[in-house]
């Protein structure tokens, strides 16, 4: 029986974010596995109380005895964010370049896990051997330090996993994209390329950080008052640009927000940002006149607890903003964040503050490949098969069409959980399905998509809460009036509502005898129905209802 080479995405194929990809090699039923990336996505307002969402790792946990390691391409949250939550169930080696390793270490430190023995630091363009996989890191360019593609060599052939990338001719910080090695890999032969699909709808090229720097310098040169720049903390090239432009315009710079400080510190530890001016503490920055200071802060997506939101609401302890100042949103508006960001923009403009964003000026370039960048990669690699990942279904389907235009013999569309057989066989195919799904971080507990805690919170949020406590004597009789508590109900005449509810409860309880547990259970269910029905008739709400029977 021939060995098989398999690919299986558990996250990131059907959504942007939450990337987790498996590669397997060996005899059917006894494959050795590696995981590439292990990321999160962030919850929206439809999931109250949930912050993080990550892939369900059940499929690979079952095979953890055959798991050789987790290989991380770069340090964005959608590629490393779940590692401290899922690693304790996997307990394998983790491989990453220096900057990514530092940020991973921080995550484990927060969880009080010593990862030192299991975290292996790989040099840039370095190699690791996890037989039957030989993995080579290929330096690419992206919107974070040390982004890597992976050349994964197996006895069946070579896979190129691009990770997140773009073609930036002047990335400003970090190494240039290793075009020479990519071309060599193409000449050596590539069985399959697993490729980023984020910007497949965007024509032309994604642009260079150098062009953003020139534009930001022009913008900042004309601004006469206080400047606040908000950007993704992880974009160290943009951070360096903020420092550069501050110095060139005769201003001091101050970093605001925990993750901004964390990334700055990590970049410095890895030997980056050595030639920039020293940032000053936000408390000290208050001593400088408005035209002499630039603040670089978190919260570019209008996050509720981000520094930018607190500054705009005038509740930040150290940064004050006033009429005539300017805020530069040097980032993309991520789909889904439009509403809260426009609300923030409107608030600032209303208060007489100039808002500069990608809608008004050239202040941002994407970290992902536009069509011309993709074309370059295809021409360098010349893969036999392309599997689009890192996209919603519409991105991946468009990427399949693009791959056909580029004359790729076997483009293959997948979704989370698809098990693709890359070898043996001439044509790669989806031949099986792995259990897949999402886990939600609820407090510090992982719960499934249909968990009761989430359903209950949605119900509470939409319909309010009603609690009825009824006292029962030892003979099974109702004692006194019920105790009623309700929250989140649009009740204006409380007395009338309570009186009507008490009548309904009294009517229902009189038709029940309470001699045993089953009868008590039947009464509780009947009271829930009666209370919800009364509330719906009276105020149009069916509250989440809890009935307590207390024996006295």
Image (cartoon, rainbow, N blue to C red):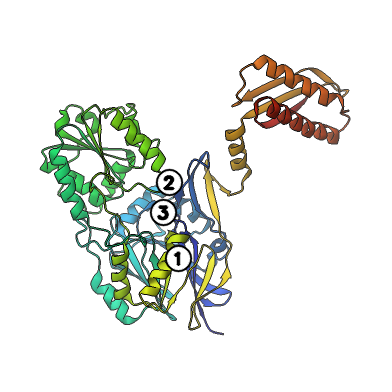
Residue 78's disc number = 3
Measured as percent of width and height from the top left, residue 262 is found at 31, 44
**Mark 3 / mark 2, whichever is N-terminal:** 3
The quadrant where residue 204 appears: bottom left
Q: Is residue 311 visible?
A: no
* Residue at the image position 64 percent from the left and 16 percent from the top: 493
- In the image: residue 537, left or right of residue 60: right
- Would residue 94 be visible to someone looking at this image? yes
- Residue at the (35%, 46%) spot, across then down: 333
Q: Position of residue 272 (x, y in %)?
A: 21, 53
Residues 111 and 459: in front is 459
Distance of mark 3 from mark 2, alpha carbons?
Answer: 16 Å
Query: Residue at label 1?
Result: 397
User: What is the number of the mark on residue 37?
Assistant: none
Dot 2 corresponds to which residue?
A: 336
Label 1's element?
Answer: helix
């Amino acid at each position: 029986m021939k060995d098989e080479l398999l690919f299986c995405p558990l996250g990131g194929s059907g959504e942007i974010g939450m990337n987790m990809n498996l590669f397997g090699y060996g005899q059917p039923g006894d494959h050795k596995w590696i995981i590439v990336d292990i990321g999160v996505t962030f919850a929206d307002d439809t999931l109250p109380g949930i912050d993080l969402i990550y892939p369900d790792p059940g499929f690979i946990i079952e095979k953890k005895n055959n798991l050789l390691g987790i290989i991380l391409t770069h340090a964005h949250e959608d590629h490393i964010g779940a590692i401290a939550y899922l690693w304790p169930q996997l307990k394998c080696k983790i491989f990453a370049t220096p900057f990514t390793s530092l940020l991973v270490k921080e995550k484990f430190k927060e969880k009080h896990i010593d990862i030192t023995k299991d975290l292996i630091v790989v040099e840039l363009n370095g190699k690791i051997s996890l037989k039957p996989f030989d993995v080579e890191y290929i330096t690419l360019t992206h919107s974070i330090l040390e982004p890597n593609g992976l050349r994964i060599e197996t006895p069946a052939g070579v896979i190129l996993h691009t990770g997140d990338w773009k073609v930036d001719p002047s990335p400003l910080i970090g190494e240039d994209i290793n075009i020479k090695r990519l071309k060599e890999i193409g000449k050596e032969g590539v069985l399959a390329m697993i490729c980023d699909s984020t910007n497949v709808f965007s024509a032309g090229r994604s642009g260079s950080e150098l062009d953003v720097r020139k534009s930001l310098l022009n913008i900042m040169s004309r601004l006469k008052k206080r400047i606040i720049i908000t950007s993704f903390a992880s974009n160290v090239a943009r951070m360096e640009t903020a420092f550069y432009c501050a110095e060139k315009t005769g201003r001091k710079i101050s970093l605001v927000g925990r993750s901004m400080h964390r990334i700055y510190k990590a970049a410095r530890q890895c030997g980056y940002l050595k030639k920039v001016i020293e940032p000053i503490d936000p408390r000290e920055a208050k001593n400088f006149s408005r035209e002499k200071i630039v603040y670089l802060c978190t919260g570019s997506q209008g996050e509720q607890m981000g520094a930018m939101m607190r500054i705009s609401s005038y509740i930040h302890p150290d940064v004050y903003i006033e009429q005539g100042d300017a805020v530069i949103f040097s980032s993309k508006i991520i789909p889904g964040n439009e509403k809260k960001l426009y609300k923030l923009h409107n608030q600032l403009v209303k208060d007489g503050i100039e808002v500069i964003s990608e809608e008004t000026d050239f202040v941002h370039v994407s970290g992902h490949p536009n069509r011309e960048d993709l074309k370059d990669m295809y021409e360098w690699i010349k893969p036999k098969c392309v599997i689009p990942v890192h996209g919603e279904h519409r991105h991946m389907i468009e990427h399949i069409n693009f791959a056909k235009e580029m004359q790729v013999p076997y483009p293959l569309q997948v979704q989370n959980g698809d098990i693709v057989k890359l070898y043996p066989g001439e044509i790669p195919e989806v031949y099986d399905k792995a259990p897949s799904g999402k886990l939600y971080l609820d407090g510090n507990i992982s719960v499934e998509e249909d968990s009761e805690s989430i359903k209950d919170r949605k119900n509470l949020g939409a319909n309010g809460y009603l609690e009825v406590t009824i006292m029962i004597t030892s003979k099974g009789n109702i004692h006194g009036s019920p105790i009623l508590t309700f929250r989140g109900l649009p009740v204006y005449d409380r007395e009338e509502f309570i009186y009507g509810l008490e009548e309904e409860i009294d009517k229902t309880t009189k038709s029940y005898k309470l001699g045993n547990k089953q009868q008590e259970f039947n009464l509780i269910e009947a009271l829930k129905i009666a209370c919800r029905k009364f509330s719906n008739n009276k105020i149009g709400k069916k509250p989440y209802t809890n009935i307590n029977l207390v024996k006295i």
